Amino acid sequence: MKRIYLDYAATTPVDTEVLALMTQIWQDDFGNPSSIYAEGRKARMIIENARKTIAHGLNASIGEIFFTSCGTEGNNMAIKNAVRDLGVEVIISAPTEHHSVWHSLLAVERDYGVEVIYLDVDDKGRIDIVQLKSLLETTTRKVLVSLMYVNNELGTIHPIQAIADLAKAHGAYFHTDAVQAVGSYDIDVQATPISFLTCSAHKFHGPKGVGFIYINGNNIIKPLLDGGAQERNMRSGTENTAQIAGLALAFRKALDSRKERMAHISQLRTYLKNKLTEMIPDVQFHGDEQGLQHPKILSISLPENAKTEILLFNLDIHGICASGGSACSSGVESASHVLEAIGLPENRRALRVSLSHLTTLEELDRFVDVLLKVKG
Ligand code: PLP
């Protein structure tokens, strides 16, 4: 039985060209990028070309891109540096952010006495922009707004342009966790005033363990790691040349084929949604279905019964990989804070299906057949 992977928001397989490039670099271009002889200079060139690719794709300066180990690192950096180095005393965020943001917020609250204000969200995971505006108008202290681009459990998209414009108009910094958005959307940091933007390669067919943070050039922050002063002293440690090159290639391929990939995914999503609605009358969908929604994520819920309790387990036995709540929390199935924030009733069982350009209609047909069998 060929297994069916429907969890592309958790991670994606590495693109074959990306894999080939990384293998070649691991084999041939293993010099330390800080070494001054030819092998080192070659590795340095690979990294700087990768930085150029990323900067070009975001309309940023090359000096504003710093490679990291993952999205979690970037989110920790943005929040903790903004507090430590930029004098941020208040952070406005939402209860639907990823753990790497939420737990960083708890840390700066605890360690620096920062006030964290969580905006209200509705049943689709949408923030209240009027509430954000009035908070920005009334707060006199230095503010960071931290709101994700695409929600990883619902696919709901925050209105990034409006948020960024509001933050700028009120002299606040703006951080967006764009881990689920990079590669899918055209992000232009000249047109959208963003202070910090974070990304992770493994969400768009790049390798795990590498990402980047964009830090607007006006924000002078100090490094969290002290050492050999790599990444212009922002992140010491010998750079992971092959993975950085893999990140850049995956990023470029995602942007180059963005329109086709998104069209394919949107078509599949509509097909799946229609089929589920037809076959399972009591199914519900939980993203911003009529509004700003990433098509790759379909958040579903079913009425709870003895069988839905073990739904993921049964899907797995039938060869299907899907996820319940957040798949990023180390294999532990705990109640999802996102589903709680949108008020999902306790008697509904949630399931997240996430798609990619590799997904086929046949896979979705099989998924629905199996779901009908195992849902009770
Ligand atoms: N932010 C969001 C929205 C995510 O979905 C994830 C991972 O799923 C992360 C951050 C963390 O990224 P990483 O796994 O690279 O640390």
Image (spheres, grey):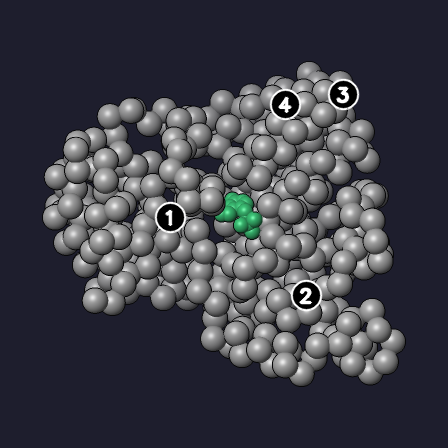
The answer to whether residue 303 is above or below residue 289 is above
Element on which disc 4 rests? strand
Disc 4, ligand 1: is the CB inside 8 Å? no
Measured in 3D between alpha carbons, the distance from the residue under mark 2 to the one under mark 4, in whole angstroms, is: 35 Å
Q: Residue at x 74, y 24 (%)?
A: 112
Element on which disc 3 rests? loop
Measured in 3D between alpha carbons, the distance from the residue under mark 2 to the one under mark 3, in whole angstroms, is: 39 Å
The residue carrying mark 2 is 240
Q: Residue at x 63, y 30 (%)?
A: 105
Mark toward the start of the polypeptide (4 vs 1): 4
Could you say where residue 86 lies in the image, as x and y percent from the top left?
80, 34
- Which quarter of the rendering shows the C terminus? top left
Q: Residue at x 69, y 61 (%)?
A: 55
Element on which disc 2 rests? loop
At label 1, the amino acid type is Ile
> Which residue is at the far right?
36
Mark toward the start of the polypeptide (2 vs 1): 2
Could you say where residue 260 lies in the image, as x and y percent from the top left?
41, 66
The answer to whether residue 170 is above or below residue 213 is above
At label 4, the amino acid type is Val
At label 3, the amino acid type is Arg
> Which residue is at the far top?
138
The residue carrying mark 4 is 116
> For the residue carrying disc 4, how many other residues have a C-alpha within 10 Å: few (<14), some (14-19), or many (20+)?
some
Measured in 3D between alpha carbons, the distance from the residue under mark 4 to the one under mark 1, in whole angstroms, is: 28 Å
